[in-house]
Image (cartoon, helix red, strand yellow):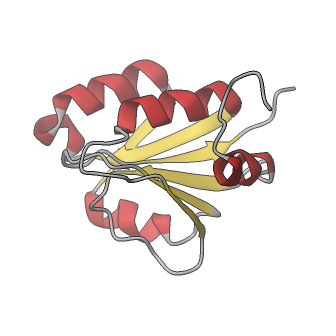
Amino acid sequence: MKRGGIVNAQLAGALARLGHTDTLVVCDAGLPIPHGPEVVDLAFRLGIPGFGPVLEGILEELVVEEAVAAREVEGANPDCHALLASRLPELKLVPHWELKLRAADARLVVRTGEATPYSNVILRCGVPF
């Protein structure tokens, strides 16, 4: 058994398969999930697991060179915006409709049980060297 980190086998494996410039979406329970990307659906009940803990766990495992969130998060969900801005200094904001279009090109979608609006981010993988 692993000593720690992400213990969900499907998620740990999916993250390990990501390479430089691959993108993944960490999303709330309401974001439409496009056909195509691998999906790891962690949602159990509304709010469980939350977006923040899932994002934090993923950020402990990945090198991120770019992050994109919906511009609407600033006004509609200031707590989520504060989390994103503090943890992802390379954060770019785009209209929500554009975020949904970009999500279709992701290699992986990680769906949380988060039930607050605009709790979504697209992460582009970097390299540790």
The quarter in which the N terminus is drawn is top right
Please indicate whether residue 16 sits to the left or right of residue 56 in the image: right
Residue 63 appears in the rendering: no
**Residue 26 x, y percent position in the rendering:** 47, 48
Q: Residue at x 72, y 51 (%)?
A: 21
> Foreground: 23 or 16?
16
> Foreground: 48 or 114?
48
**Residue 81 x, y percent position in the rendering:** 28, 31
The extreme front residue here reads: 1
The extreme bottom residue here reads: 35
**Residue 39 x, y percent position in the rendering:** 56, 65
How many marks the image carries: the answer is: 0
> Foreground: 9 or 25?
9
Q: Residue at x 79, y 46 (%)?
A: 16
Residue 60 quadrant: top right
Residue 93 appears in the rendering: yes
The quarter in which the C terminus is drawn is top right
Please indicate whether residue 49 sits to the left or right of residue 5 in the image: left
> Foreground: 70 or 40?
40
**Residue 3 x, y percent position in the rendering:** 76, 21
The extreme right residue here reads: 129
Depicted 88 relative to depicted 35: above or below: above
Depicted 55 relative to depicted 22: above or below: above
Q: Residue at x 32, y 42 (%)?
A: 48
Please indicate whether residue 96 sits to the left or right of residue 112 in the image: left
